[in-house]
Amino acid sequence: MIGDSSALAEALGRFEGLYPDTIELSLGRVLNALELLGRPQDRLPPVIHVAGTNGKGSTCAFMRAMMEAAGLSVHVFTSPHLVRFNERIRLAGEIVDDARLIDWLERTHDAIKGQEITQF
């Protein structure tokens, strides 16, 4: 985790013990985690999901720039990150800071009660 603060690296590290030993080709683990977190996806503004092999980062950057130019507040999640885990999450154009990300990670870890989950 190049560039991550020690506190953030520790918070991310707590999830490594929850990584499953087997691949499960379903959304079961994610859906279970979302239920334990109180279904936060139900409170999201409209979402655009960009998927595929090539061009996701460029597509997201282009769409973000267009929407921000139109005066919209845009939140973006991309994966993987290049240097710091925080790069994955932008709220209203700003990369999420360590303190906020650590808070989210700790609350998520507490809520899922040891259920198997990965960062993907």
Image (cartoon, rainbow, N blue to C red):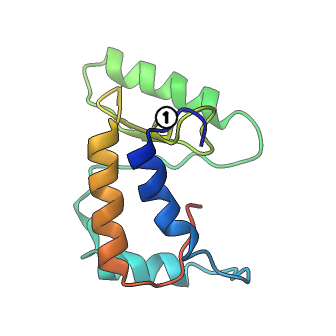
Q: How many marks?
A: 1
Q: Is residue 70 above or below residue 55?
A: above
Q: Position of residue 83 (x, y in %)?
A: 60, 32
Q: Which residue does the image show at 31% across and 63% down from the upper left?
A: 106
Q: Amino acid at mark 1?
A: Glu
Give the answer, above or below, for where 8 lies relative to 73: below
> Does residue 36 lie above or below 73 as drawn?
below
Q: Is residue 119 visible?
A: yes
28 sits left or right of 34 in the view:
right
Q: The residue tagged with tag 1: helix, strand or loop?
A: helix
Q: Which residue is mark 1?
A: 87
Where in the figure is residue 1, as x and y percent of width and height? 59, 43
Can you tell which quarter of the image residue 2 is in?
A: top right
Residue visible at 64% across and 37% down?
56
Q: Residue at x 37, y 71 (%)?
A: 109
Most foreground residue, 58 or 120: 120
Instruction: Report crowding for label 1: few under 14, some 14 to 19, many 20 or more residues within 10 A (C-alpha).
Output: some
